Amino acid sequence: MLVTKNTATARLSANLTKEGRQALFSPLEDFGTVLTADEWADLGLFPPAEKLAITTNISSTDIKAQDPEGGPDLTLATDVTDVTATYDNIPILTPDALVRALHVGSMPTAMAGALAGATISPFAPGASIMGRFILIRRHKGAGDPIFKVYWHPRFALQNNGEGDSQGKDTLQFRGAVRSFIDQDKLPAELQAYKPQVAPLGAIITVPRSKLDALLDILKGAAKLDAVAPAP
């Protein structure tokens, strides 16, 4: 009889936990005076039904050979030729002034004179703010539950229009993960794990008790300056 390693836990109703998600963003360059390159913004709360999950698209090519017995061609391997990763919709239910400024999508310039205190930004549909992104997936649990932290050292944040949830307006963003190509500029605490940090980032599973320590390390990476060219 085959006995699985997690026989005692695989079907426990205690596993039915609902995850909460928190999204953090930091720009690669100062976004006017709204958010500097060494600061992070909490994007706020999300509507209840939103999962805020990443979508990947993978293009691949099969490597084939002739069947020596004369049958259909044999597939020997599959080469991955292209990968894209996006957060198609990031709807914010509680946007504050900082998040509203990011939603404009283009660099604000402070105005003077009679308009002192106002800012002006180009109306530039499709504009992206290059930065860094952290998505924290939390859930309740006894003891010291494990959380997942999605870390993308290069991330393009883009206005994705406006929506509605429960009769309240939401501001919608789209996020495209970009390639980070200079692993030598990882935080010192992550230098030993360079092979595990892919160009699109890393998924770090961490006990709740170590989450703050991890975030301090990732936030300390805010002065990384190796920017991959946008496609």
Image (cartoon, rainbow, N blue to C red):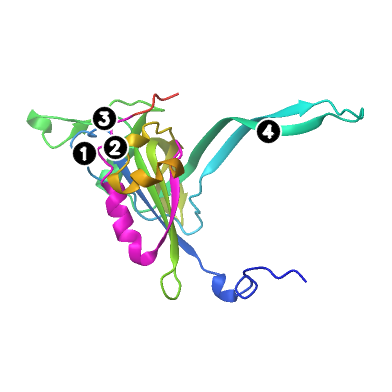
Along the polypeptide, which appears first: circle 4 or circle 3? Answer: 4
Q: Nearer the viewer, mark 4 or mark 3?
A: 4
**Label 1 element class:** loop
**Mark 2 Cα within 10 Å, few/some/many (few <14, many 20+)?**
many
Q: CA distance from mark 3 to mark 2?
A: 11 Å
Q: Residue furthest right?
A: 70
How many labels, in total?
4
Q: Are marks 2 and 1 in contact (CB under 8 Å)?
A: yes
Q: CA distance from mark 4 to mark 1?
A: 43 Å
Along the polypeptide, which appears first: circle 3 or circle 2? Answer: 2
Q: Which mark is residue 28?
A: none
Q: Can you say which quadrant of the picture contains the N terminus?
A: bottom right
Q: Residue at x 30, y 59 (%)?
A: 212
The residue carrying mark 1 is 36
Q: CA distance from mark 4 to mark 3?
A: 43 Å
Q: Nearer the viewer, mark 3 or mark 2?
A: 2
Quarter occupied by residue 118: top left
The residue carrying mark 4 is 78
**Label 2 element class:** strand
The residue carrying mark 3 is 107
Q: Is residue 100 left or right of residue 67?
A: left
In the rendered structure, which amino acid carries the disc numbered 1? Thr
In the rendered structure, which amino acid carries the disc numbered 4? Thr
- Residue 206 within the magenta-colored segment of the rendering: yes
Q: Which mark is residue 27?
A: 2
**Mark 4 Cα within 10 Å, few/some/many (few <14, many 20+)?**
few
